[in-house]
Amino acid sequence: MSYKLIETNLDEVTGVASIVLNRPEQRNALSSELMTELSEAIEHFEGLPVVGCIVISGKGGKAFAGGADIKEMAGRTYSQNYKDNFITANWERVAQCRKPTIAAVSGYALGGGCELAMMCDIIVAGENAKFGQPEINLALLPGAGGTQRLTRFIGKSTAMDMCLTGRMLTAAEALSLGLVSRVVPTDELMDLALDMAKTIASKSRMTAMMVKEAVNTAYETSLSQGVLFERRAFHSVFATGDAKEGMTAFTENRPPRWDNK
Ligand code: DAK
C-alpha cells in the first residue's frame, strides 16, 4: 500500500510493523487525510498474521505530532464536526487495534499528538520529548480522549494542571508519572522501540493480544470485574496450542515454537 502522509514498513522476519507520521515541516500535524491513512495502515497491519507489534513514530525528530491540524480545523463548524463524526471517524482506530502498539515519542507530542500516543499501549520517549494538552491556548479542549486518558494515567491534579495551564511535561516528568515506560537518549529511541516491538512480536500472538485486552480492561471497569475478566482469560488461554507448547517447552528445557493456534 502506498501513502502520502505516512511511511510504513514491515519486517516479516521479526513481525514488527512501523508507521512513521510524515509531515515533518508541519510538525506532523494530524490532518484528516493523515489520520485516515494511519487508520488504514493500522487496519492493514492488524489483519496480517505475520505482524506481532506496531510502532508509531514521527518523522524529523522535532515532533511525534504537534496536534490536530489547527489550520485545517480553523474552518470547521459545529455541524460539520457533528455530521462527519470528526475525530471518532478516523482517530479511534488506533485505540481499537487488537495488536500491541508502541508510540515512540521524539520531540513534541501535543494535543492530538499526546492523545494519539496515549491511544497506543506503550509510550517510550527520547530525552527531548515534551507532552502537553495545550488546546486551552486555542480556546479548545482535548477532543480525542485527552481529558480522560491523561487523567486515568497520571491522576487528576497533573492532568488538570496540563489541560488548564497548557504546560508541558518533560520526558523525565512523564516517566516519573508513569505516562511513559522508558526514556532513552533521543538517538537511541527508534532502536529501543523496535527492539521492544521485536520482543513483543516474538511472543505468542494470541496471548499478547489477550494480555493487551486484559490490561485495557483495567481502565474500563471495576477492580472485581477486571479481575474476573483476567481470570476468565487465564482459564481460556489453556485452550490454545501455544500455552500447551509454552509449558511443554519449559518442562523439556527448550525454546517454544508458537503456531498461534
Ligand atoms: N497544526 C497545524 N500546523 C502546525 C501544528 C498544528 N498542530 N503544529 C505545528 N504546525 C506548523 C506550524 O504552523 C509551522 O508551519 P509553517 O508556518 O512553517 O507553515 C510548522 O508546523 C513549524 O512550526 P513551528 O515553527 O512553530 O515549530 P517549532 O518547532 O518552533 O514549534 C510546536 C513546534 C509544536 C511547539 C508549535 O508549532 C506549536 O505550539 N504548535 C501547536 C501546538 C498545539 O496547540 N497543539 C494542539 C493542537 S489542537 C476536537 C478534537 C481534537 C482536538 C480538538 C477538538 N473536537 C472533536 C472538537 C485536538 C486539538 C488539538 O490537537
Image (cartoon, rainbow, N blue to C red):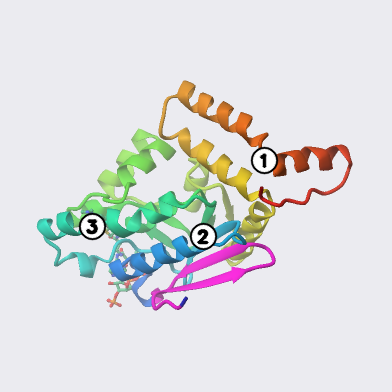
Query: How many angstroms separate mark 3 from mark 1 (CA)?
Result: 40 Å
Mark 3 Cβ inside 8 Å of ligand 1: yes
Q: Amino acid at mark 1?
A: Thr
Which comes before the other along the chain, label 3 or label 1? 3
The quadrant in which residue 138 appears is bottom left
Which span of residues is magenta-colored? 2-24
Which comes before the other along the chain, label 3 or label 2? 2
Mark 1 Cβ inside 8 Å of ligand 1: no
Q: Which mark is residue 47?
A: 2
Is mark 3 in CB contact (under 8 Å) with mark 1? no
- Disc 1 designates what residue? 240
Q: Amino acid at mark 2?
A: Gly
- Disc 3 designates what residue? 86
Q: Please state the total of marks drawn on the protein image.
A: 3
Judge whether residue 115 is colored magenta: no
Q: Look at 46% across and 24% down and name the residue there.
A: 225
Q: Amino acid at mark 3?
A: Phe
> Alpha-carbon neighbours of circle 3 within 10 Å: few (<14), some, or many (≥20)?
some
